[in-house]
Amino acid sequence: MSGTVITDLRRRGAVDPGRLLAGPLRGVGLQRLDPGRRTEVAADGVEHALYVTAGSGLAELPEGAVHPNQPNQPNQPNQPDHQDRQDHPERAEAGLPLVEGTAIVLPLGSRTVLTAGTAGLEYFHAVLAVPPSSEVGDPR
């Protein structure tokens, strides 16, 4: 089994898979946020995949985003105004609840802020490289 590497992410934290893999995976690791702590994850030049393994928290929705539990209605703008927030309070929520088993994918150009709940938040985090010619909205 030459070339095979086994790493305990709970003991080691993050690893650089680029030493072994030729694909777009640039970083993997188990991340922990203490209760109430926050961290920003921005997909600037890379994409992110997060999977909650323990605890709970919140992922801040981007400005103007619609909560996934309340899809846009026809003839309603994507940017909620004051009246729209009163009619649809879920659009004004601080974010998307994170619990064990929740996955988040951040495509190129997106961002979120993660906030850990009272028990903290643990998540597996993978960073994927994006070819330089790719741009947001590229139909590849």
Image (spheres, rainbow, N blue to C red):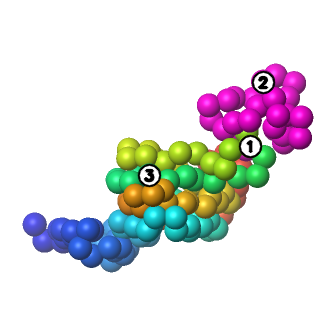
The boundaries of the magenta stretch are: 65-90
| Residue located beneath label 3 in the image | 56
Residue at the front extreme, as displayed: 118
Classify 10 Å Cα crowding around label 2: few (below 14), some (14-19), many (20 and above): few
Residue at the top extreme, as displayed: 74
| Residue located beneath label 1 in the image | 92
Q: Nearer the viewer, residue 6 or 87?
A: 87
- What secondary structure prevails in the magenta region? loop
Q: Quick check: 59 left or right of 136?
A: left
Q: Amino acid at mark 2?
A: Gln
Classify 10 Å Cα crowding around label 3: few (below 14), some (14-19), many (20 and above): many
Residue drawn at (85%, 29%), measured in percent from left and top? Answer: 76
Kindly check if marks 3 and 2 are in contact, taking CB atoms under 8 A apart as contact.
no
Q: Secondary structure at mark 2?
A: loop
Q: Amino acid at mark 1?
A: Ala
Kindly check if marks 1 and 3 are in contact, taking CB atoms under 8 A apart as contact.
no
- Where is residue 99? Give x, y as percent: 43, 46
Residue drawn at (21%, 68%), measured in percent from left and top? Answer: 8
